[in-house]
Image (spheres, helix red, strand yellow):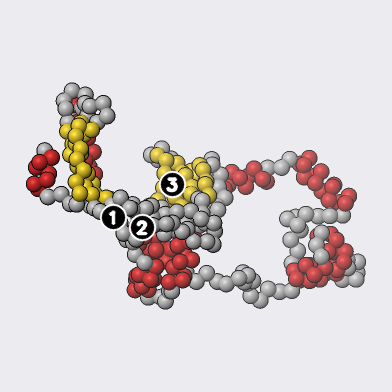
Amino acid sequence: MDYLAKITHEQKLENSHLWKYQFLDTQTNNQDYFYHDRQISYNPDAVGKLSISSNKFLQSFKKEIGEIIKKANKIENLTDLERGTRKSIDKAFGKISKKQIELSPQKLHELHNRKKGFTWKKLAKIYGKSEATIYRWIKPITKLPQKRGCKPKFSKEVLNLLFDYNQINNTATQQERANFISQKLGISISQQTISLLLKKMGITRKKKTPQYTQMDEEKAKTFNEEIKPLLDKMPFIALDECSFYPNLVPRYAYSLKGERAIVKTPSHKGKHYTLLFAVSNLKVNGVIHWKLVEGSVNWKVFYDFL
């Protein structure tokens, strides 16, 4: 998706390497956001062509040429007095800024000629660098310097595919995710690598929160809006039931790091009970009637309760 936009705000996500950026679409005046895996420099007043993927990841942001020209003109718009002052200071201290002197290796060799009287040590002093740096400037570059560390094994395509797959199937194991990416992209990837990538993306394994597929959220929302005006005027009675074991204990507990969280638990869950209750919107505490039944509930027990 492409926008003509201004980037207005940035935020580093907790426990993640991702950055979240907010932007303003100048054509529709709408606010939106995107993610990027590293921090980017931006000017809140600069308008540019913004391109993001369908899952809200940055693809490119190009500033308008007018903004670049304006900034370049501002830098070059020095008065004659300022230029003269700068030259006087450079001449007085014998130092010339690196931006003003961009000498080729041939020029450096000419300056080093004994007739010119510039030694390597003096040239290094003029530049404010060491002699080793001057030697490195003179030495012709035969190949581009390589970055330190290991080359990244996986591209943004792998990260985007892993993120999209998590949105579709967040209960899949790490091995299932590795198999899915291997099948889609034809590359070899291990479960351990998937674990590192998930950690890098800020995706963690946690206890699930169920959301029942039988419930239609739109219909439920519409129903709630329809009955809201009637709640203060007409009586509504709701019936429900729940079953439990008295000896159940919480599933989670706290302990010191590196030690087990030991909880004394009965060897047997105990008897099974079912609680039936009816609640009304017009009663003070809500509960009209309740009944505790040992064991499960069948139609006869429920009929007697009614």
Instruction: Decide which of tag 2 and tag 3 comes sooner along the chain.
Output: 3
CB atoms of marks 1 and 2 within 8 Å: yes
Say which mark, if any, is on residue 33.
3
Q: Is residue 41 above or below residue 200?
A: above
Badge 2 density bin: few <14, some 14–19, many ≥20, Cα 10 Å: few
Between label 3 and label 1, give the one nearer the viewer: 1
Q: Which residue corresponds to the image point at 58% horizontal and 47% vertical from the top-left?
A: 69
Q: Which residue corresponds to the image point at 48% horizontal and 66% vertical from the top-left?
A: 196
Q: Amino acid at mark 3?
A: Tyr
Q: Amino acid at mark 2?
A: Pro
Mark 2 and mark 3: Cα distance apart in space: 51 Å
Say which mark, if any, is on residue 162.
none
Question: Label 1 belongs to which residue?
Answer: 270
Give percent across and percent down for residue 213. Answer: 23, 52
Residue extending farthest to the top is 233
Question: Label 2 belongs to which residue?
Answer: 266
Give percent across and percent down for residue 93. Answer: 88, 51
- Left or right, 204 with respect to 95, comes to left
- SS category of the residue bearing label 1: loop
